[in-house]
Amino acid sequence: MFPRVRALFVLPLLCLGGAASAVPRPAVVELFTSQGCSSCPPADVLVGELARRSDVIALAFHVDYWDNLGWRDRFELPLAAQRQQRYVQTLGLSSAFTPQLVIDGHRSFVGSDRRSITAALLQKSDGIDVRARMVEGNLVVELGAGPQEPFDVSAAAYLPRADSHVERGENAGRTLTDFNVVLALVPLGTWQGSAARFAVPLASLPNDATQVAILVQHRGQGEIVGAQVLTIR
């Protein structure tokens, strides 16, 4: 059982000052997958390849709705299915599916569609400058001044790689390799466009997570406008 996550504080950050200019940012790809889905392994492999790119932040959210086929995904998160369902609503999709890959919170693809995903990632985007660092046992995120509208700031703590032997379900008998597995998605607070600092204790994040991705996303799980990765262990 992971420890309960508790955000420490949100404080004005006057020292950054000035209006934030747009900066090049990595694309964020979110794969919704399951160890119980026979169509998912090719998408998991693709995410592993994307994870090696410096211009991409790749995250894998393991959903729990494949459990009824006999195998419980060891990395399943109830919030993964909730997050995916929210994308179904915001992107006007007919239903959720696996493997599904969402780029920057506003473009959806079949997660194994390598050609379309690679082409989509050729479109470079500017965004918000996100600064993340460790300070006295806390993960600290700093944002300068920016658009005067609400954004959700969150931290996705993840495990870069894990191998699992699947004993039942559609992938029975296979050893699967999963990449950038999200173990917790922690809301840090709301950014309204004024310079601010957010913090969360490192001890409240899952012990197996060695990396964290900071996401700045339009309120209501809209487009992602800023992202950064930090090694925390």
Image (cartoon, rainbow, N blue to C red):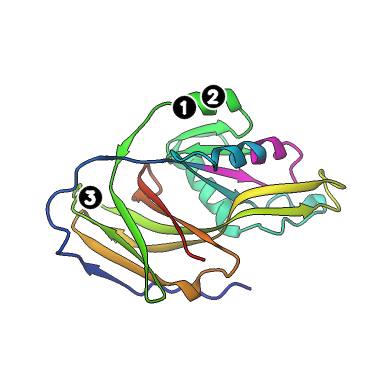
Please, what is the three-letter code of the amino acid marked with disc 2?
Ser
Q: Residues within 10 Å of mark 2 (few under 14, many from 20)?
A: few
- Compute the Cα span from label 1 to label 2: 6 Å
Q: State whether residue 98 appears in this view.
A: no
Q: Are marks 1 and 2 in contact (CB under 8 Å)?
A: yes
| Residues at marks 2 and 3, CA–CA distance in whole angstroms | 32 Å
Residue at x-position 72% and y-position 36%: 39
Q: Secondary structure at mark 2?
A: helix
Magenta region: which residues?
Answer: 30-44
Q: Is residue 50 found left or right of 217 in the rendered image? A: right
Which mark, by number, is residue 116? Answer: 2
Label 3's element?
loop
Provide residue 60's location: percent of width, then percent of height. 58, 48
Q: Which mark is residue 111?
A: none
Q: Nearer the viewer, mark 2 or mark 3?
A: 2
Image vertical order of residue 147 relative to residue 124, above or below = below
Residue on which disc 3 sits: 149
